[in-house]
Image: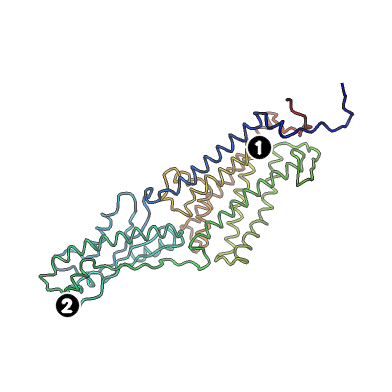
Amino acid sequence: MNVAEPGAQPPLVRATAMVRHGKIWLVPTITSALVALCLTLLYVGGILNPNGNLHHLPVALVDNDQGPPLPGQQQPLGAQLSRSIVAATPADTVRWRRLSQAGMQDQLASGKIYGALVIPPDFTASVRALTTPGATARPVLAILTNPGLGSFGSSLASQITQGAAHQASLSIGRQLTTRTPAEGATTTARALLSDPVTVTTRVGHPIGRHSGLGLTAFYYTLLLVLTAFVGGNIINSGVDAALGYTDSEIGPWYTRHPTVPISRKQTLLLKMFLTAGITVLTTSLLMIAAIAILGMDATHIPLLWIFSYCASLAVGLGVQAINAAFGGIGQVVSMFVFVALSLPSSGATIPLEAVPDFYRFLSLFEPMRQLSDGVRAILYFDARSDAGLTRGWTMIAIGIAFALLFGFGMTRYYDRKGLHRAAPQPLTTPRR
């Protein structure tokens, strides 16, 4: 029997020997399959049928028509048009908000509506003019968009209002054409009366040219979350390696530091301190790259920096708390919390009113929605509190408080139970 010399390296194991062990396949296979399945269901499920999932999309309806009514009518055509638009809209798909001109402008400027349909003051008068000899001009309805809420949401509201206005125009035309022979209208006038309304579209609340058609708020928020998520995991691994609880390996270079006797609670405190400090640098670099180098349109720069730092800090502290509580699978858990579940429920690309109910439920607490609302308010809506900034600050505070309570609560529990972290053990050759 051969006895290995003291200090000799154990015999190297071949991959072909390890691959035959069923246990080495089990956890990676199940975990990878579940991640692939869940990510596909989450991301594809939220975008398949926006029109079919449409639920109470807020759009303004402004009736400025001053009449007077046409002969035989009791109200100006604007009032009839408003009623027919609301009646023709499928139930629960659009939430028409009947607003004044000033109220509409305020809600466009605060991001509360995706668009507006405006009936001008001379609408009835312009329709009446069509029944006179030589009439050639058609009445005009104005559709206003709100690109600050994203190009898709603004486009969806524009399509809905255009369709509603066209159907209402045909309905009014059918009423008017029955009266034209008695009034002696020309052939041109009768043709115009069959579809009397022209619809024009313009921007109701302009944003900067370098705003990505309203998508810079989403991508900027995504960068805040991703840098905090990735940075938090880098800090977690780096601290564990420095304390001697994991090995450090970069390319062919391998390092194992002496194990530092430290409690789980103190380890988490150290990681959170590093997170708070490093986030200052990452937030600053992110803003420099996006605004100074790439030229992204942005206002309220100091406020944007403070909000960005606090948002990244909340995510980073959450990552550290989850890793401390769940250990090795903490990175997967935090990925689902901050990325996988958060992205499709953010409402930043597809409005929450156009996604299934499950995503609207997630949006109540998932961080991406809260943070993107705050960033959007700062970038597009003059940092108005009612445009989502107050909600953003509130949820950041709740997120930080929850991360601290959950993280330190779990680590204190582990320490009191004596569930201390074990130092790495020497590598042993697995049994065949």
Q: Toward the viewer: 165 or 81? A: 165
Q: Position of residue 169 (x, y in %)?
A: 25, 63
Q: Position of residue 152 (x, y in %)?
A: 44, 57
Mark 2, other Cα within 10 Å: few <14 / some 14–19 / many ≥20: some
Mark 1, other Cα within 10 Å: few <14 / some 14–19 / many ≥20: few
Q: Position of residue 187 (x, y in %)?
A: 17, 73
Drawn side of residue 67 relative to residue 251, left or right: left
Q: Give the structural element (helix, strand or loop) at label 1.
A: helix
Q: Is residue 339 above or below residue 68?
A: above
Q: CA distance from mark 2 to mark 1?
A: 82 Å
Q: Earlier in the sequence, mark 2 or mark 1?
A: 2
Q: Give the structural element (helix, strand or loop) at label 2.
A: loop
Q: Is residue 252 above or below residue 197?
A: above
Three-letter amino acid code of the residue under disc 2: Pro
Name the colour scheme: rainbow
The image's mark for residue 133 is 2
Residue at 59% over, 38% down:
32
Farthest left residue in view:
182
The image's mark for residue 82 is none
Q: Position of residue 250 (x, y in %)?
A: 75, 46
**Which residue is the site of mark 1?**
328
Farthest bottom residue in view:
134
Q: Toward the viewer: 415 or 186? A: 186
Q: Toward the viewer: 249 or 187? A: 187
Q: Quadrant of residue 181?
A: bottom left
Q: Is residue 61 above or below residue 184?
A: above
Farthest right residue in view:
5
Q: Quadrant of residue 165?
A: bottom left
Three-letter amino acid code of the residue under disc 1: Gly
Q: Toward the viewer: 278 or 179? A: 179
